[in-house]
Image: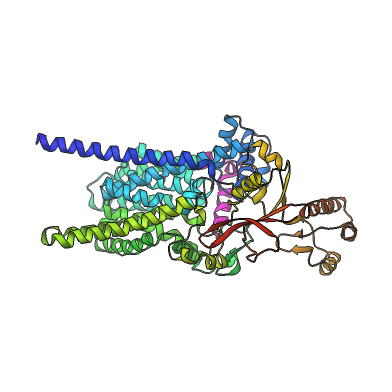
Amino acid sequence: MFINGQNMIKNIKKSQISVCLFFLLFLVVGLCVFKDYGIPLDGTTQRNLNGIINVKYILGIDDALLTSIERYHGAAFEVFLVGMEKLLRLTDSRHIYLLRHLMIFLLYYTGVFFFFLICKKRFQSWGIALFGTLLFILSPRIFANAFYNSKDIPFLAIFIISVYTLLQYLDRKTFQRAVIHAFMCGLLIDTRILGMFITAMTFFFVGIDLFLAYRSKKFNTAKTAATLLVFTVFLIVFIIMFWPILWDGPAYHFIQSFIQMIKYTPWIGSVFYFGSKIKGTNLPWHYAPVWMILTTPIMYTAAFFGGTVLCVKSILKSMVSALKNTRARYDLIFFLWFYTPLLSVIFLRSVLYDGWRHLFFIYPALIIISLHAYRYLFVFIEKFKAKNIRFYRLGICCMGVFILLSLIHTSAFMVKYHPHQNVYFNEIALLNMEKIRDNFELDYWGLSCRKGLEFLLDYDKSPEITVMCTDKHGRNNRLIMDEKQRRRLNIVRQRASIVIIHTKSLEELIKKNPDILVYRYNEKSLIAYSVVDEELGKKLKKCYTKEKDLFLIDRLINESIKINKATYFITTYRWYKREYDYELIHSIKIGNATILDIFKMK
């Protein structure tokens, strides 16, 4: 008895040490690499139109939030980020964005730890939980996003924590657990309203418990009902507390944000999918599933499909127990976690763009479900240990080698192409990345532009370097350079644009100058892709009479002149996939596909 007790203590210490070392190593890796990533296309927009604007509203500086196009985007984490930079009195853009990178990673790190706790709770094994956590970390796209994506990664991390608090609350319905779960659900909803899904699951499973308890008359339903009431009250309080736009009218703005979630009307752009430009409002049903399969390691996907079969079998075999407080219930929760949002997006035809990043939060469920397949395979092989030791050893060896090779391949990609893990495609796709580039978006957020600018700063020692970049990639990534480097970089966009009303005279002028001027009706913007010279500028001004319009045209002329002054041109080939007729001086490649090129224009 004493010896068994000692062995148990040794095993507990071994597991605790292993887990501590694992998460310590993970933390060290994160702290070493968080400075390496660039600023995404939406990075400055998130800070300005979601963070700063909410902070100003909270402090009573102005009420621009009430009319902002971003007003219904959950602001909880962005307010925290801006609050941190103000608390630390940061004014330098490099320090501000490095802080953002660090805070996003630390929240992701916290989410990963709670993911480990969920796995341990379900499988009652720290080994399986640690293995699942390793698979989760070795998911290249999510790993890269965990350092700069202040929208999808916070939602992913808080969603994981909310699932854990849900499981805890369902296990033991106390007032304390109800309040903690309400806090996490409120925070989740105030990050993205889709977090209502966890609240719905809470009411569903607690409702089932109340119904079953009432029928059996074995338990006191009054306390369970009381904890649910406490959960509801505190949930409402926390939702309003962490979402400033609701302070102006909780019910109205909450309903509007829910409507916007279903049909994201403010976004009228397009995506590049299977070689075609498709509007975000008209995506085929398979857009999200295809993106998920292509950008998830093959071993994970195969195990997930196997795990799904086992999970469904387990739920159907014990449907009644799946509605009670058992592991089968956990499996049902994980199953709903993955499939409900995915099927909702497909059937409601919700607007998606930039791959499947909006669905990152269902990925942990994919890993948990896949663990069923790994465990089943191990248990199946284990049966032969006493019957046929050779077959057992062969089976364990084959399984270990297969898993190890997959993890080594994924890890090698993450190390070799650091910090461009966001452009990861699975093992089959990587065999011909050039074909993938011709059919799908790669570095759509322009993060590789940071490495491109760093190359130019080292390549050209001039006191000022004028660089033309596609979209806002150059201007954004310039912000993460140190002050001395920023002073040397003069960034101009590949095009100059103004928002202006379309007129018949403007239309005629565009027809005569198609290589210079383009009008986008959906954005109401006039775009100049080349220099608007003095003569064309005069003709353009004749199309308008208002002082405001003439001022905008002058700005368009000045901006367009800068285009031809650029010495270098950086492109990420998001839309234009063909080569440019300039002198190529540097490329960044993933496999055989170029994700960024730098050309010398003069």
Residue at 51% over, 42% down: 34
The image position of residue 405, as x and y in percent, is 34, 57
Give x and y (percent) for residue 533: 86, 57
Image quadrant where residue 494 sits:
bottom right
Q: Residue 243: image x %, image y %?
A: 55, 42
- Quadrant in which the N terminus is drawn: top left
Is residue 196 highlighted in magenta?
no
User: Which residue corresponds to the image point at 55% horizontal and 58% vertical from the top-left?
Assistant: 589
Q: Residue furthest left?
A: 1
Residue 106 shows in the view: no
**Which quarter of the rendering shows the C terminus?**
bottom right
Q: Main secondary structure of the magenta part?
A: helix
In the displayed structure, does residue 208 sit left or right of residue 540?
left
Q: Residue 2's spot in the image, x, y percent?
A: 10, 34
Q: Which residues are magenta?
A: 239-263
Q: Nearer the viewer, residue 164 or 185?
A: 164
Asked whether the viewer can see residue 286, the reply is yes
